[in-house]
Amino acid sequence: MSNKRLVVAGGNAAGLSAASYVKRRKPEIEVIVFEKSPFASYGSCGLPYYVEGIVRDPMELIAIPLKALREKRGLDVRVMHEVTEIDLKRRSVRVANLESGKDFELSFDWLVISTGAIPLVPSFMDKKIPGVFTLRTLEDGIKLEHFIEERKPRRVTVVGGGYIGMEMAEAFSARGFEVTVIERLPRVLPNFDPEISEKVQRKLTEKGVRLILGDGVKAVEGDKTVRRIITEREAVETDLVLLGIGIKPNVELAKKAGVEIGNTGAIKVNQRMQTGVEDVYACGDCAESFHRILNRSVWIPLGDTANKQGRVAGANISGEDVLFPGVIGSAATKVFELEVARTGLGEEEAGNEGFSTETTQIEAGTRAHYYPGRKPILIKLITEKGTKRLLGAQAVGEEGVAKRVDVFATAIWAGMSVEELAWVDLTYVPPVAPVWDPVLVAAQVGMKS
């Protein structure tokens, strides 16, 4: 009797997490992972730091080399192989070998769909112009770096003011380029509340980054290479364009097969990461997540979530009964000297979801007042009126921001009220925190409001 087989479509965070878990717990199961790019198991979140030059070699972003995945973990990982079709009745996949041009069919007992997300590209970009890039895969980063080395651009335009746009604005600026950021909404980092975004905007301007806000891109012009971007209000001369306007879940493979897509546009799954088809799982950036505050499915694509979801899928395929407990939207980024982080719901977001809210905003020092290097940190809390339940927190400052937001995330995860948080026993030592940590100050003020 032949061994049972798990097929994984997509060989990065979620897919490899699921595959590794199954092989570790059930070594008798044949595990085959198909990845359409030349690389597997890499940290795409590190790509801006490769472009900036902090990471010298793109291969440093690979978490586990192919040889180790195959020899140490016992996984049959095949790069340059794309799953092009899923036949749910036959319980098989069709796979294209992108190097040989041949394809083949393979049966499965379990299937994990971990096809990730793909960059949004404006409709006017149907003509590919050299010098216009997205940054999602390791290949993207390598191609971008080769262009910079060969063409020596002087002016760079980043379209989109979200996480990737901010990180790339810093990366390009650090390399001495003239940087322009175009964002169609009125502020950068639009998923943060205005008080936080404004501080980031001031920092960008201080660093010489030109901001064009509330203005959409209509066209990108060029022939042999990109020359200018046409917005609704002006023309911006440029030698390189980085499109960072967002991503969407890569669900076409699942959709064509008849796997249900949720209201978010991502693959609908339960908390075991099961789709509506028996023995077919989905995890990572192509799948939905359960939101613990909103008590419904959302799509919040993040690398740490992908890894956790993959592990949950792997556990359930292995015969365990494990639930993915959900997300609350915790995220952080760094823009020049500023750390920026959030968790839970923002003020406008909470209002749109029907919550009656109160907000608290404080600025406090990150260390004892007498200890050198003390930095200000701005914290904003969003609480539910009446119950004082903590719904969200956002912060910006030059140090210790993520540490504080992690405390708020833990409190929200546990369903704590702001009064309970106000007396939590946090660490204190002058070089890293004052006696009353900014977390406690914000909670104390929130408790009285």
Image: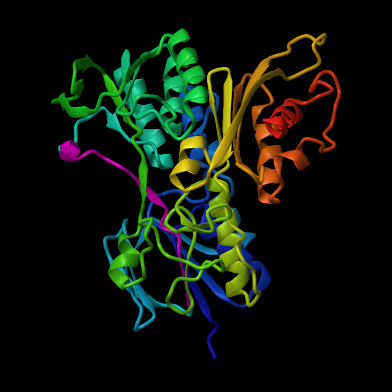
The vertical placement of 31 against 303, above or below, is below
Q: Which residues are magenta?
A: 110-126
Whether residue 74 is visible to the viewer of this picture, yes or no, is: no
Q: Position of residue 374 (x, y in %)?
A: 73, 13
Residue at 43% from the left image edge and 15% from the top image edge: 173
Q: Quadrant of residue 358?
A: top right
Q: Quadrant of residue 380?
A: top right
Q: Position of residue 356 (x, y in %)?
A: 53, 43
The answer to whether residue 256 is left or right of residue 70 is: left
Q: Nearer the viewer, residue 124 or 59?
A: 124
Residue at 41% from the left image edge and 42% from the top image edge: 137
The vertical placement of 341 against 32, above or below, is above
Q: Position of residue 386 (x, y in %)?
A: 64, 44
Residue at 44% from the left image edge and 29% from the top image edge: 189
Q: Nearer the viewer, residue 418 or 45?
A: 418
The vertical placement of 232 against 63, above or below, is above
The answer to whether residue 102 is left or right of residue 377 is: left
